[in-house]
Structures are given as C-alpha cells and as structure tokens.
Image (tube, rainbow, N blue to C red):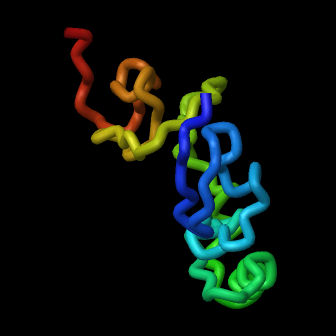
Amino acid sequence: DFLPLRCDACGEVFCKDHIRYDDHSCSSAYKKNVQVPVCPLCNAPIPVERGEIPDIVVGAHMDKDCKYNPAQQKQRIFTHKCLKPGCKRKELMKVLCEQCGGNFCIKHRHPLDHNCKGSSCPTSKA
C-alpha cells in the first residue's frame, strides 16, 4: 500500500508512514516546520529569526520586554467586605447603604438587614 507522497521540504518521495519530517529525518525540515515560541510568563508570541535559538530569544524577552506582573496575578477581585458584624462575605463592587453610607454584601444591603442607624427617618418594613 505504497502511496507516493512528496515531502514539501526536501522533495523526496515517501509512503504515508514516513512522510512526516521526523519520520524520515528530513534535512530541510527547518524551512517548513516553523514554530513560534510563546513566553511562559505573559503568553505572548516571540518572533524568532532564522538561525536564532528560540530558548535564547525567549530568555532575552523575559529579561527585558516581558509584560508579566506577578503582583497582578495575586490581586484579589472580591475586596469589598460587608460591615455587618459576623458576616464574612465580600463583593466585587461596593454596595453602599443610602442612609448610613456603609458597605454591605447583597444579603445585608437593605437598612433593615443590617440594623441601620444612619438616618433619623424610620424605615418601613414594607
């Protein structure tokens, strides 16, 4: 079952089992088998010129051009803590009470839910 396939790099003819560059140790594979390395820190593609060693180019990128910020990875998203005593919930956005101005979670956002004492106006239970 020999299917003649021509290697697009070296021009030799091979069967389907040996057409891959690695399978026939193609000496011209570097012309066609071009891969762009990616920085392991910032996931940016790093352009490599012919003849350059990708490891050295990526290392140079990491030393001077990399936009990776380790402090940014550890940033917390939910930073707005509920002020109701005993509640440990945190929200993505501030949820401020209109009467006392305190920051609360969604569950305790209404004045009756956090025993608001900020306004002299009585709050109806309706």
* Left/right of residue 63 with respect to residue 124 in the rendered view: right
The x and y percentages for residue 63 are 76, 86
Residue drawn at the location 41% of the way across and 45% of the way down = 93
Residue drawn at the location 23% of the way across and 31% of the way down = 121
**Position of 77 relative to 8 (above/below):** above
Residue drawn at the location 46% of the way across and 42% of the way down = 92
| Picture mark count | 0
**Position of 70 relative to 22 (above/below):** below
Please name whichever residue, 5 or 113, is drawn nearer the observer in this view of the structure: 5
* Left/right of residue 21 with respect to residue 102 in the rendered view: right
On the question of residue 35 being in view, the answer is no
Please name whichever residue, 36 or 9, is drawn nearer the observer in this view of the structure: 9
Which part of the image, by quadrant, shows the N terminus?
top right
The x and y percentages for residue 30 are 66, 73
* Left/right of residue 108 with respect to residue 16 in the rendered view: left
Residue drawn at the location 78% of the way across and 60% of the way down = 25
Which part of the image, by quadrant, shows the C terminus?
top left
**Position of 108 relative to 54 (above/below):** above
The x and y percentages for residue 46 are 60, 76
* Left/right of residue 92 with respect to residue 10 in the rendered view: left
The x and y percentages for residue 91 are 49, 37
Quadrant position of residue 37: bottom right
Please name whichever residue, 84 or 49, is drawn nearer the observer in this view of the structure: 49
Please name whichever residue, 6 or 20, is drawn nearer the observer in this view of the structure: 6
**Position of 112 relative to 88 (above/below):** above
On the question of residue 72 being in view, the answer is yes
